[in-house]
Amino acid sequence: MTINVRGYAALAVKEDLVPHNFVRRDPRANDVVIDILYSGVCHSDIHNAWNDWGGATYPMVPGHEIIGRVTHVGADVSAFKVGDHVGVGCMVDSCQHCAPCLQGLEQYCAEGNTLTYNDIDRHDQMPTYGGYSESIVVSDKFVVKVPAGMDLKGAAPLLCAGITTWSPLRHWKVGKGSKVAVVGLGGLGHMALKLAKALGAEVTLFSRTPGKEQDARRLGAQHIVISTDEQQMAAVSNQFDLIIDTVPYVHDLKPYVTTLALNGTLVLVGYLGELDPFLNSAPLVLGRKSVAGSVIGGIAETQEMLDFCGAHGITADVEVISMQEINHAWQRMLKSDVKYRFVIDIASLQA
Ligand code: NAP
Ligand code: ZN
């Protein structure tokens, strides 16, 4: 069973994505074959394709917010059947036997999880290719079910933006009475607002960008603070139990640490890299505050998040684009000009 796939790929660093044909692996006994319907566009796709984090290999087919329909299941697969609507996020495999994997924390697999793209399959050593393409072959343990009736295009961003913000909200036990702030209103930020609100928290948005107030309120923020305005920042000192920081680039954390309450935590989910010289231990020591990090979420937790979203009528706010518009969409995302997630209609690949 040779699976020929059309997609879009980066062929070299910082070059536009171009049409690219490739072959998916022959399905194994525990594999699910999925026709991709929608693929969300995450800022990580740019970081990866532009080699911001190192380790980029080309051709690179990005995309880790995948929604599709099952077209084939291997002999050992019982949880899925042909026709099911399913999702695939940032990981497609992990060792399955280390302590984190046994706790359902595959994203922290001690041997390293296998990423959906720009990685090497741990069984056949073939490169992995992502969701900017017609179909994908994934081990059943890394496939999740889309709740019945959920809007499929709005569901795609839940597979990365949703779970990446859900996981810290759950880990730090956000609920009624919690005061949560979100830094940056983009793909991750808008999901953080929706999810924190639905969990019962009082939610504040920190944004550099005036003009997002109305949207932020609609998405779940009760308060909006312009982070470049010192007076507005001073007015919210010592308040927040949890701050979810989605900013993609290095930035000064001190103004945000000041706004943490006693025992509060600022969790970085956006930026990956050196923080020095932007941290000072004094406010951490004197207020028992923490600066932490978090990456995506486990598979069971991803299903929990999808089910919660299904029960609460939550999906992402999306701008649907054709595959051919992807390079323009990336340029817009770099200018924070997206409300609030681009999603590729994969049917456009047939155009
Ligand atoms: P996005 O849609 O581009 O949103 C980022 C937001 O951050 C922007 O809308 C903007 O909000 C703010 N921002 C952008 N540049 C900034 C700057 N230079 N200084 C301060 N604020 C800035 O990106 P995204 O898809 O949500 O992803 C955000 C980051 O999370 C990316 O770095 C991505 O790689 C990372 N990520 C991490 C994980 C994980 O597991 N930890 C998972 C997915 C993505 P305002 O205009 O409101 O200020
Ligand atoms: Zn992502």
Image (tube, grey):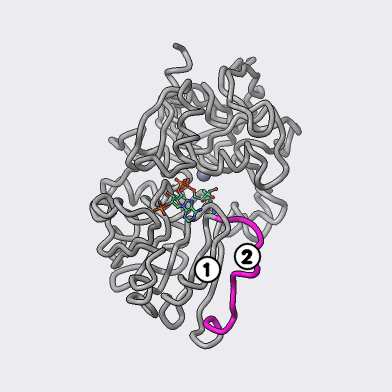
Q: Main secondary structure of the magenta part?
A: loop
319 magenta-colored: no
Separation (CA) of disc 2 from disc 1: 9 Å
Upstream in the sequence, badge 2 or badge 1?
1
Where residue 337 sits, quadrant-wise, is top left
At x 30%, y 37%, the residue is 150
Magenta stretch: give its range. Answer: 271-284
Please state the horizontal and vertical placement of residue 69, each as a whole percent of the image.
43, 26
Q: Label 1 near label 2: C-beta < 8 Å?
A: yes
Kindly identify the amino acid type of the residue bearing the numbered disc 1: Leu
Q: Looking at the rendered structure, which numbered label has been put on residue 275?
A: 2
Where residue 273 sits, quadrant-wise, is bottom right
At x 53%, y 38%, the residue is 64
Number of dots carrying numbers: 2
> Badge 1 is on which residue?
253
Please state the horizontal and vertical placement of residue 167, each as a whole percent of the image.
47, 58
Of residues 103 and 186, the one nearer the viewer is 186
Tell me if residue 104 comes above or below residue 115 in the rendering: below
278 magenta-colored: yes
Tell me if residue 44 comes above or below residue 265 in the rendering: above
Q: Is residue 138 left or right of residue 149?
A: right
The N terminus, quarter of image? top right
Tell me if residue 139 comes above or below residue 279 in the rendering: above
